[in-house]
Amino acid sequence: MAVSKADQAYDILKAKIMDGTYGPGYRLVIDQLAREHGISSVPWRESLRRLEAEGWVDIVPNVGALVKTFDTHSWERTMRLLARLEGLATALSAEKLTAEDIGHARSLNAQMRDALANFDTVRFGKLNREFHEHLCSRCDDDRLNTLVHHEWTRLELIRRSAFFYAPGRALASLSEHDSILDLIEGGADFDMIETAARRHEVNNLVAVMEDDKKRAAEAAEA
């Protein structure tokens, strides 16, 4: 099936936003995009409206389309939504994960420990996403899988806008990964796995929020 010009324009913009070519706050000028890619202005307008609806672009009167700049509240909302989506997807996937799947997940967790020991935060982040998406990989709900992938992609974009970090949280998260795998391997019921996976993401959120409050209080006292 032929891909429409609007879909082509959308794919181009989405890819460049995701890889950082068009970073937060970047102004997307339709005439310039049309010249660069040989696609007329109408498909670009359609794609920008679609990206605005999905939350990737802000269309500002008298300014134009800007790649969305995320703040702490955006990160919090994304984390809360991801926690629920991923908890459900992991629980639905769990009973279909093979011994080989679980072994691969444990290998990814071990590689994360190695990355953390070597202060390689970029590698740690990539492995962490791979770990979480791997646990959801046997979920047979394609719509849910798409939503999980979408929110992980959004989360990575937010992290390029601002650095969210809580001392000691990364190491604690690896222990929680092991606990989730133990539940799956031990044949725990759906609710236990869903709760553990959801709480894991919420714990990340709480740790960052508490550290943020602590830093703000220290700054106010200085």
Image: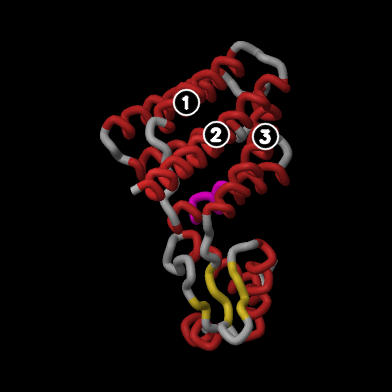
> What residue is drawn where x is 67% and y is 21%?
95
Left/right of residue 206 with respect to residue 167 in the rendered view: right
Which of the numbered marks, if any, corresponds to residue 89?
3
Mark 2, Cα crowd under 10 Å, few <14 / some 14-19 / many 20+, is: some
Inspect this view and state whether residue 12 appears.
no
Q: Say which residue label 2 marks.
A: 134
Image marks 2 and 3: residues in contact by CB distance under 8 Å? no
Which corner quadrant holds the N terminus?
A: bottom right
Label 2 sits on a secondary structure element that is helix
Q: Quadrant of residue 97?
A: top right
- Whether pointer 2 and pointer 1 mark residues with C-beta atoms closer than 8 Å, the reply is yes
Q: Label 3 neighbourhood size at 10 Å, few (<14), some (14-19), many (20+)? A: many
Pick whichever of labels 1 and 3 is earlier in the sequence: 3
What is the CA distance from the residue labelled 2 to the residue labelled 1? Answer: 9 Å
Q: Specify which label sits upstream in the sequence, 2 or 1.
A: 1
> Is label 3 in a helix, a strand or a loop?
helix
102 or 77, which is in the foreground?
A: 77
Q: Residues within 10 Å of mark 1 (few under 14, many from 20)?
A: some
Q: State the extent of the magenta-drawn residues as a range.
A: 152-157
N-terminal label among 2 and 3? 3
- Residue 65, image x and y in percent? 57, 77
Residue 192's spot in the image, x, y percent? 68, 19
Query: Going by the image, does 161 lie left or right of 153?
Result: left
Residue 92 in the figure: left or right of residue 204: right
- Indicate which disc residue 155 carries: none
Q: Amino acid at mark 1?
A: His
Query: Mark 2, mark 3: which one is toward the viewer?
Result: 3
Q: Amino acid at mark 2?
A: His
Q: Which mark is residue 104?
A: 1
Q: Magenta stretch mostly in which secondary structure? A: helix
- Given residues 216 and 175, the one toward you in this image is 216
